[in-house]
Image: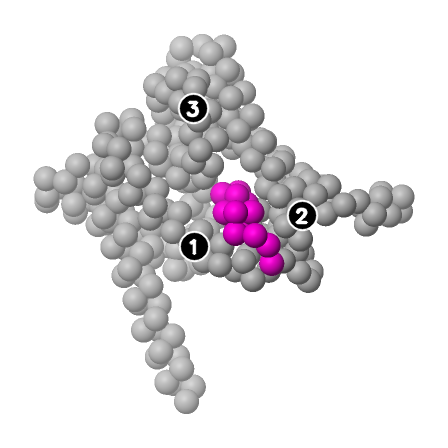
Amino acid sequence: MEALVETKSAGPFRQGLQGGVSIALGYFPVAITFGLLARTTGLTFMETVLMSLLVYAGAAQYISLSLLAMGTGVFEIVLTTFIVNIRHFLMSASLSEKLEEDRLFKKAIYSFGVTDETFTVISVKEGKVKTAYAFGVMVISYASWSVSTGLGFFIGEILPAFLQASMAVALYAMFVGLLVPSMKKSVKVVFLAATAAALNSVFLFTTDLSEGWAIMISTFVSAVIVEWVASIKKKGEKNSEG
């Protein structure tokens, strides 16, 4: 009861920090794994930490590691990251309506901290959300991701050589772990993953595209196809109801 009273009386920034604790705890093992994998991929400590500080996008960072391991060019990595994170446009637009009116430069700052998790925590809060609350959620989440990345890199230094070499397999296991739960919840995700995998194989075996370009183009084309099919299905359901 005392904790509840204390939370209600706390300022919006402190409430945001409290609201973001669960995100920070969830980021800890994922970011440590990223730091460890980044080291085995060949990145330096500074490069690893800077990727988390400047990119701050879990799935995109893991994809970047796999592309770097394949020797993919910078332009393909940047473009693939853009496609993977394009959903952030929609999340930012939604949060813009949820948060209180504020100066543009403040919106530009907290927009950097938008992730799937921070978006969810802020969105479910009742009523208009204060900017300070959003900053609180994002600061603790960002700090957890960045610090844990560095810890993961240092943990990699004390691992035996054979374990470090085996971490390349862990990178693909991580992708499977991220994908399977989504596939269980949505047939659309299953169709998207299957289409992207099929297109990627076609591009690799029938064209001269590099692995990076094949992944990027197959991701984009499969997303367009899936959304097109979904829109046709919706129109068909509306027509049948009418």
Count residues near mark 2 (Cα–Cα under 10 Å), then give few for <14, some for 14-19, many for 20+.
Answer: many
Tally the marks: 3
Q: Observer-nearest residue: 196 or 119?
A: 119
- In the displayed orientation, state which residue is furthest to the right: 2
Please provide the residue range marked out in magenta: 101-116
The image shows residue 36 at horizontal and vertical percentages of 45, 22
Q: Is residue 168 left or right of residue 185?
A: left
Earlier residue among tags 3 and 1: 3
Which residue, given by chain and number where applicable, does mark 3 sit on?
Answer: 48
At a point 67% along the width and 53% down the height, the residue shown is 130
Q: Residues within 10 Å of mark 3 (few under 14, many from 20)?
A: many
Name which of mark 2 and mark 3 comes first in the sequence.
3
Residue drawn at 83 percent across, 47 percent down: 9
Residue, disc 1: 89
Residue 20 is situated, as x and y percent measured from the top left of the image, at: 65, 42
Q: Secondary structure at mark 3?
A: helix
User: Please, what is the three-letter code of the amino acid marked with disc 1?
Assistant: Phe
Q: Quadrant of the C terminus?
A: bottom left
Check if residue 104 falls in the magenta segment. Answer: yes
Of callouts 2 and 1, the N-terminal one: 1
Determine contact: label 2, label 3, CB under 8 Å.
Answer: no
Kindly report the distance in space between the C-alpha atoms of the residues bearing marks 2 and 3.
Answer: 29 Å
* Image disc number at residue 133: 2
Q: Is residue 229 above or below residue 177?
A: below
Amino acid type, label 3: Thr
Rate crowding at label 1 as few (under 14), some (14 to 19) or many (20 or more) other CA atoms within 10 Å: few
